[in-house]
Amino acid sequence: MLMREDIKAAIEAILFVRAEPVELNELLEILELPAADVKEILEELIEEYNSTKRGLQIAMVDRGYLICTRPEYGGILAKMGKTAPRRLSTAAMETLAIIAYRQPVSRSEIENIRGVKSERVIASLLEKGLIEELGVKPAPGKPMLYGTTSEFLRMFQLSSLKDLPRLEED
């Protein structure tokens, strides 16, 4: 049986190698440990990363865990040249906001809100992995429905869509 520090190291290694969110169920399967133990160890690890000045953090995104850099070091990392920060156009940010708050949403619904064509912006967001196709709307023409991805949550440092800022009502 693995010791507690070995389990922490194993979790770090799994999250590092995957480089995308790892769901708790997968960690349980890999580590062959009870859920309560793994959850407790994950909480300890997150606290350790948060309590010390490290360049990395373990974040809970969507339904999984991810090891990633801290946002406050983005400026330093950008100087490396290899990891250019993602820049989104105003049109992409508008479209992404509509999708995040209204999902599942069709292209025509997005275009009605924005007042302009959005086909290219949606294609760009799909390519970047920030949105995904969720299926088709049961309506004439069966339009595609879009929603955000775990990459969207990671990029904006959200645990879930519930963490989105509240919209002001007019």
Image: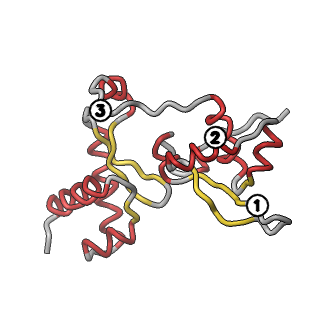
Q: CA distance from mark 3 to mark 2?
A: 25 Å
First reached walking from the N terminus: tag 1 or tag 3: 3
| Rendering coords of residue 97 (x, y %) | 66, 40
**Looking at the image, is 155 positioned above or below residue 9?**
above
| Rendering coords of residue 50 (x, y %) | 32, 40
Query: Residue at label 3?
Result: 82
Tell me where residue 6 sits by quadrant.
Answer: bottom left
Relative placement, left or right, of 52 versus 152 is: left
Q: Which mark is residue 143?
A: 1
Relative placement, left or right, of 11 versus 162 is: left
Q: Residues within 10 Å of mark 1 (few under 14, many from 20)?
A: some
Q: Residues within 10 Å of mark 3 (few under 14, many from 20)?
A: few
Residue at point 61%, 42% (across, down): 164
Image quarter hosting the N terminus: bottom left
Q: CA distance from mark 1 to mark 3?
A: 38 Å
Q: CA distance from mark 1 to mark 2?
A: 16 Å
Relative placement, left or right, of 62 versus 42 is: right
Query: Considering the numbered disc 2 on the image, is that residue within a helix, a strand or a loop?
Result: helix
Residue at point 76%, 61% (across, down): 143
| Rendering coords of residue 117 (x, y %) | 75, 40
Q: Amino acid at mark 1?
A: Pro
**Looking at the image, is 12 positioned above or below residue 76?**
below
Residue at point 48%, 49% (across, down): 151
Query: Considering the numbered disc 3 on the image, is that residue within a helix, a strand or a loop?
Result: loop
Query: Residue at label 2?
Result: 121
Residue at point 28%, 59% (across, down): 41
**Looking at the image, is 74 positioned above or below residue 159?**
above
Relative placement, left or right, of 87 versus 39 is: right
Q: Residues within 10 Å of mark 2 (few under 14, many from 20)?
A: some
Q: Amino acid at mark 3?
A: Lys
Tell me where residue 69 sits by quadrant.
Answer: top left
First reached walking from the N terminus: tag 1 or tag 2: 2
